[in-house]
Amino acid sequence: MNDELLIKVEKALEQTGYPLELEIGAKLTQLGWNIFHSVDYEDPFTDTSRELDILCYKLINNRRIELRIACKSSTNKQFVFFTEPHHYLRFGTNIKFTPIIDDNEKQRQIPKILKDLPLFSTKNRIVNYTVLTGDKVDKEGRTILRAAHTEVMNSIYHRLFPYELYFDKRGTIYFFIVLIRGIMFNASFNPSTTKITATYSNYEYWHGKFPLPKEKYKGRTLEIDEQKFSIYDLLHWFGDYMSVEFVNENYIEEYLSIVENCISKLNSEEIQYFGKSWDKENFPENLSKPRKISK
């Protein structure tokens, strides 16, 4: 056996995201999460198959909490996130959950009852990002980071779309995460010095428009148990805005603890915003029964 070649292979593997994916998967399993690696899903825009690094879930307060994770690793690059204060209205569709709520007033309550989540408690949001190698911009690194960002956004179509928006009454909350092994920085404008100030960071979040293909389904209906629903309306209430969280691996355990504590302490009235419990009586009776989409 060629020991020198083995050393080179192991060193090269350290520069990929796969060791991180396996390590994080093992850590999440130890913390009680159910893990699936390399999950395939269909992109309805391109009708092509895509892949998500990790999908995992855990029942918290008898609701399914699901993480959709893309892993990115680099020991010699720096991930820089340019941020600004979030001036826009926080709304329930900032976080994705099913079944949907088709009520504006209820939607407005979501950021209040989940205010302790980093997603809602962090004041600044990402407006752009770059990747550096030392003092030079690494365009290839930024492309890779952008691909991870897109990967978790596109995973919104896995199982959520279009049936589960309304069909399954059991509550599920979804978190879209880019998990980073490497040094992260927050870069923001300092009005007092009129310069960009950089600080070390373990967590940043992006919030923006991610248009769903509503027009593709305009005028079409989804039939569930002989009831017909407008797919366009379902997608409207699900929302064209979403959030992606960029989490450093050093922060992931604390992040998960915050998520679990926040959802665990929701009272019986608040938890009802997120569908029914995962008790046996709430499981759909006809999971295998086809649901029809009109043409």
Image: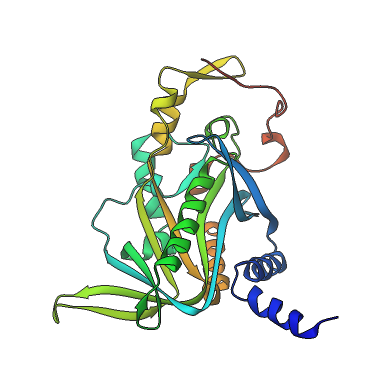
Specify whether 203 is left or right of 59.
left
Residue 202 in picture, x, y percent from top left: 45, 75
Q: Nearer the viewer, residue 57 or 22?
A: 22
Tell me: residue 68, above or below residue 42: below
Tell me: residue 193, above or below residue 254: below
Residue 135 in picture, x, y percent from top left: 35, 82
Colour convention of the picture: rainbow
| Residue 116 shows up from this direction | no
Quarter of the view holding residue 256: bottom right
Q: Nearer the viewer, residue 261 or 179?
A: 179
Residue 115 in picture, x, y percent from top left: 40, 59
Which part of the image, by quadrant, shows the N terminus?
Answer: bottom right
Residue displayed at 38% across by 58% down: 206
Residue displayed at 68% across by 30% down: 284
Specify whether 157 is left or right of 240.
right
Specify whether 137 is left or right of 88.
right
Q: Nearer the viewer, residue 98 or 9?
A: 9
Quarter of the view holding residue 19: bottom right
Q: How many marks?
A: 0
Residue displayed at 46% across by 25% down: 231
Residue 270 in picture, x, y percent from top left: 48, 48
Q: Please, which residue is most extreme toward the right here?
A: 1
Q: Nearer the viewer, residue 101 or 207?
A: 207
| Residue 282 shows up from this direction | yes
Residue displayed at 54% across by 47% down: 155
